[in-house]
Amino acid sequence: MNKIEILDRIEPLFFERAFAEVSMDDIASMLEIKKASVYYHFDSKESLFSSLLERSFERYIESLDSALAASGSHPPKLLERLVNLPSESRNLFAVVSQRGYCRVPAMRSRIRLLENTVMERFHTFLAHRYGFEQTRSAALYLLVDAIAKRICLHECHDDQLPWMLDEVVRCFFSHE
């Protein structure tokens, strides 16, 4: 089993549980290999997680770009795709802050840098498509992220989502 296979197979474990709740024994057990085999590829749980975060981030960016491109000029469709992205993709990077990974000192600055990259990509799209300024893009990003967390963490697929998104569209995209 190579590094990429290991990372792809263990991502669900870190998606479901916080960093402190996952041991190298858990990882080896999930992979059905000896713990020494995991250490052959990664010298620590932190280095394994760092590699996983990078791989997850790359896939998250692909999903984000796809969601942005598929939305066209239809804000409700854009917002719906973005708030559902974490729960539908089950991508670790999409939930990295909810799972408390930003509290891991070795990961904090890297996560912040990656999140800034996502926010900049989001802003570039909104600035080009809708003429948004940086602060407006940031406010929308944080709001969409909060709604996505609610859906992902609480599995809140109920009647609240449509009216929340309608209100966000009205607040951010209406030209009144």
Image: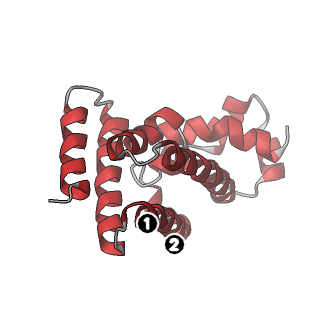
Q: Nearer the viewer, residue 62 or 133?
A: 133
* Direction left: furthest residue: 176
Q: Which color mode does the image show?
A: secondary structure
| Circle 1 residue | 123
Question: Taking 69 as reference, is 136 left or right?
Answer: left
On the image, the x and y values in percent for residue 77 come to 38, 39
Residue shown at 75% from the left, 40% from the top: 6
On the image, the x and y values in percent for residue 148 come to 35, 44
Dividing the picture into quadrants, the one containing residue 140 is: bottom left
Disc 1 and disc 2 in contact, CB within 8 angstroms:
no
Secondary structure of residue under mark 1: helix
Q: Estimate the spatial distance between the alpha carbons at disc 1 and disc 2, rounded to whole Å.
A: 21 Å
Q: Nearer the viewer, residue 63 or 34?
A: 63
Q: Nearer the viewer, mark 1 or mark 2?
A: 1
Residue shown at 47% from the left, 56% from the top: 101
Residue shown at 29% from the left, 41% from the top: 150
- What is the crowding at mark 2: few (fewer than 14 residues within 10 Å), some, or many (at least 20)? few
Residue type, numbered disc 1:
His
Residue type, numbered disc 2:
Ser
Report whether residue 35 is seen: no
Question: Taking 10 as reference, is 135 left or right?
Answer: left
Label located before the other in sequence (1 or 2):
2
Question: Taking 166 as reference, is 66 left or right?
Answer: right
Q: Nearer the viewer, residue 2 or 81?
A: 81
Please state, as top left, top right, bottom left or bottom right, where the N terminus lies in the image: top right
On the image, the x and y values in percent for residue 112 come to 48, 68
Q: Is residue 167 above or below residue 46?
A: above
Question: Taking 43 as reference, is 139 left or right?
Answer: left
Residue shown at 60% from the left, 54% from the top: 57
- What is the crowding at mark 1: few (fewer than 14 residues within 10 Å), some, or many (at least 20)? many
| Circle 2 residue | 109
